[in-house]
Image: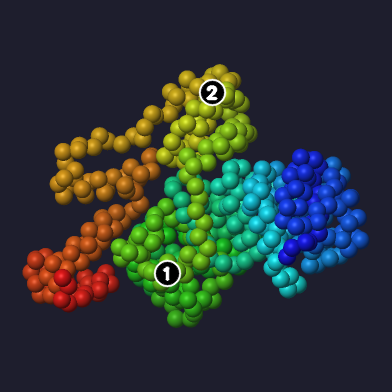
Amino acid sequence: MSGATILIADDDRAIRTVLSQALGRQGHDVRTTGTAAGLWRWIEAGEGDLVITDVVMPDENGLNLIPRIKKLRPNLRVIVMSAQNTLLTAVKATEKGAFEYLAKPFDLRELTTVVERALSQPAPAQGGGAPTPPGDGEDERLPLIGRSPAMQDIYRSLARLMGTDLTVTIYGESGTGKELVARALHRYGKRRRGPFVAINMAAIPRELIESELFGHERGAFTGATGRYSGRFEQAGGGTLFLDEIGDMPLEAQTRLLRVLQDGEYTAVGGRTPIRADVRIVAATHRDLRLMVRNGLFREDLFYRLNVVPIRLPPLRERSEDIPELAGHFAALVQAEGLPAKALTADALAALKAYHWPGNVRELENLIRRLAALYSQDVIGEASIRAELPESPREPAHHPQEADSLGGAVEGHLRTYFFAHQGTLPAAGLYDRIVREVERPLIELCLEATRGNQIQAAKLLGVNRNTLRKKIRDLDIQVVRGLK
């Protein structure tokens, strides 16, 4: 839509000038004001095709204008700008009905693109919408910290998801805050009054996973002395967080897939179907697409879970957030009774230069350690460098072994043991490694024998029926006459 009238409210004259010039070059009629009152007068008079407003203005919070605008002129879209670059700001803007939220400083090309999208898209149908915003008395401690562009993208994505029940899968290295994101989705979502139930798939013995998820009836197996309500039932009306979903055994994946497809399940040993009334949020530090290709994760389950993927960046990709995170953790440990500490500029620079293999969790542990062990009130660069290793703590690798099969396997295994410093691999490592080696080995033998399973079985030294079962279990495609 060209030639639209755009109303801009911001108490920063420089921002008003930049926006007026940029949007004027797009052919729009731009009117600017430094107050919420000036903006409201135009709106009451029926003027303007689009509103762009700051949040903090001298006479009123811009977010408080949005419900009044929606009531008086439901089809007038509002774009919110804010230097309060937090998840809470993005959520409130979305809940109140903003078309888009942009953090300051914003990219001018992005803003002009959002403006054209707001002017060209048809007006939404009235009714429904986002959940009721939290009341003024609700605890508003920020669930996520960071003002970097990477975090702003996450805030906007989360804000759009709050009013939905869409399944979300959160990807990220250990220590990046995946459970915090899941809890934020629940806390500000439409199911906030229901329970938030978490289960770590890597921490549950494989023979107990189905019982933990779906519950069991008395006598279902040895030791089942009474009825047990599983996590699906416990999370009824709320959110079920499936942490480390990549470590779920294949047989349990099949049961979970059926629940996601049919919307109901039966307890172990039970016969009566139970309706699943939960929102599913999953998380993993693994590459699920690669696991699908390697036969370690069901492809159909992957697409059921991967409706909305969210990638959490490692701390090394958002080092500009480190000072704010460090300040946040320092305030937490002080509230817990440890002495207050301040960091010098050089100390902060050293933190920003570090690679952070343990991500935000490692930073939090460092701040706690500094508060507990150091007597000085101001922590300098020397103390920081004394606490941080210069490189990840990995055993020395012997290059002469790299060309052997054992050396190659060892190199691969290092990704399990040392990719995330300070943490051990999830349980069930033996079966996962065997499956990763087994599939390519069988595929190569079949390729070498041009799909002849009898010859491939001899080459492998296994029974033909065993090979057939492996081919079926690993879903290997056999093509005869391969060259």
Q: Nearer the viewer, residue 366 or 274?
A: 366
Residue at (48% x, 25% y) in the render: 384
Residue 219 in picture, x, y percent from top left: 39, 73
Residue at (23% x, 37% y) in the render: 397
Residue 342 in picture, x, y percent from top left: 60, 25
Position of residue 413 in the picture relative to residue 86 (left or right): left
The N terminus lies in which quarter of the figure?
A: bottom right
What is the CA distance from the residue labelled 2 to the residue labelled 1? 48 Å
Residue 249 showing in the rendered view: no
The C terminus lies in which quarter of the figure?
A: bottom left
Q: Residue furthest top?
A: 376
Colour scheme employed for the rendering of this structure:
rainbow
Which residue position is annotated with label 1?
301
Position of residue 91 in the picture relative to residue 28 (left or right): left
Label 1 Cα neighbours within 10 Å, binned few <14 / some 14-19 / many ≥20: some
Which residue position is annotated with label 2?
346
Q: Nearer the viewer, residue 140 or 72?
A: 72
Residue 82 showing in the rendered view: yes
Which badge, 2 or 1, comes first in the chain's sequence?
1
Q: Which element carries disc 2, helix, strand or loop?
A: helix
Q: Quadrant of residue 141?
A: top right
Question: Vertical placement of 406 versus 66: above or below?
Answer: above
Label 2 Cα neighbours within 10 Å, binned few <14 / some 14-19 / many ≥20: some
Question: Vertical placement of 180 versus 478: above or below?
Answer: above
Q: Nearer the viewer, residue 214 or 246?
A: 246
* Three-letter residue code for mark 2: Asp
Number of disc labels: 2
Q: Nearer the viewer, residue 120 or 408?
A: 120
Residue 264 in picture, x, y percent from top left: 50, 76
Residue 8 in picture, x, y percent from top left: 80, 51
